[in-house]
Image: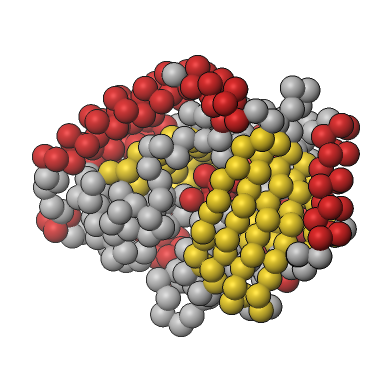
Amino acid sequence: MKQANLGLVFFPAFDWMISPGHPERQERLLYTRDQLTEEGLFDRPEIREYRLRMAEINDLQRAHVGVPSIAKLITPAHLASAGGCLTAADAVMSGEVKRAFALVRPPGHHAMRIVHGIRGFCTINIEAVMVEYLRSRYGVKKIAVVDTDVHHGDGSQDVFYHDPNVLYISFHQDGRTLYPGTGFPDEAGSPAAWGCNLNLPLLPGSGDKEIHRLFDGLIKPVLDDFEPELVINSAGQDNHFSDPLASMSVTAHGYAALADKLKADIAVLEGGYSIEAALPYVNTGIILAMAEMDYSKVIEPDIRALRTPDPRCMTRVEQLIEQVGNIWRTRREVGKMLLDKCGSKWQRKKGIYYDEEGIREEQLETAHYCHECSGWLSIATEARGTRYGDQSAYVVSLRRDTCAACQKAAYDDALRAKQSCEYKYILVQHQNTGVVETI
């Protein structure tokens, strides 16, 4: 079979919705598919379409721990959406295609390691599930995730915050003006992974020139320095000037040109809610760019509604290039200083709100460090107002290389938590197998 330039996986999830008329609905993909069919792109030899396979629960549990369990919090649509990403990964890793684009829903980049329900339209972080699959199935070690959604991917940040082998870069509308209210440069990773989480909050109104200056001046040099084995694009399209949920000024051509520069191995659809005015054109542009085809004629019909960005938008970009570039350049020295300061463990408290279900969660997360391995995590979580009532859990997460001594320490910690009778559930996550034990 001759290698195609691009593999496509579609899953519009006809049987899944948050509520009737919700912005996250099946038409997000249907208009795009109609546009691609009209353009005859499915008949081009550069593009090959794939039928997805379903993900397994263990695939999800390499990245997540659900309370009371992942199986009780998802629908078959979530397994299909995640499975579409795994199908795209297989197509690339087998060499059948150069690149792949999973146009699937439900989306995922707001789903964190601990899951109590739906937040930001997300229950399962489909990119994180794919990253862990690539590691388990193919032994890929260094991966970069570039998130181009207008909302900060706080879930992806959470999952990868302790991992120096995943570089997470997100540009997004400033969190002081948009959900989820996070994504600032000082959120740069825990001490063992300092500088591998790079946030680039842009001023509302930023457009093509701003994102391309940011890419050329910072993102591309950082990617070149990191030297990932694979680049994944969380391809949110709600930076578009017509999107009803945000206030940015990016065009379809701007998105396509960015995809052309980024040359991601795998792209995964995230947000984008201008269903008729933007998504068919943005998706078409990205697909043409990833397939190494001409995208110069992709123009939205309402391009005259585009606003000229305020000069302060570019000023912010230049500030970010300097500030975040310095975080990257000094990451090793600062990381060592932070590790020396915190010793054998590092903690952070988090208050997390699930906007779709009104759940309020409090977490105390502890990273336990070791000189022989990557250590392990413990997370105490309490959530009020879940669909199963108030929930509490103590979660221990064993990483892929957690040594025998750390495994014993982690299990001892879990047993102490059980004996305290403070938590309803005591759970142990094995990231290498996707098994989540109940103690």
- Quadrant of the drawing holding the C terminus: bottom right
292 or 131: nearer the viewer: 131
Residue positioned 84% across, 52% down in the render? 416
Taking the spot 65% from the left edge, 75% from the top edge, the residue there is 390
Q: Residue at x 24, y 57 (%)?
A: 247
15 to the left or right of 62: left
Above or below, 140 relative to 44: above
Residue at (76% x, 49% y) in the render: 396
Q: How many marks?
A: 0
Q: Is residue 392 visible?
A: yes
Instruction: Check the picture and name the quadrant holding the N terminus.
Output: top right
Q: Quadrant of residue 94?
A: top right
> Nearest the camera: 47 or 387?
387
Instruction: Report whether residue 9 is seen.
Output: no
Q: Please identify the quarter of the rendering in which residue 287 is found.
A: top left
Task: Please name whichever residue, 288 or 333, is drawn nearer the observer in this view of the structure.
Answer: 333
The location of residue 40, given as percent across then percent down, is 42, 53
Position of 317 relative to 39 (above/below): above
Task: Point out the residue furthest to the bottom here.
Answer: 20
Q: Position of residue 211 (x, y in %)?
A: 28, 38
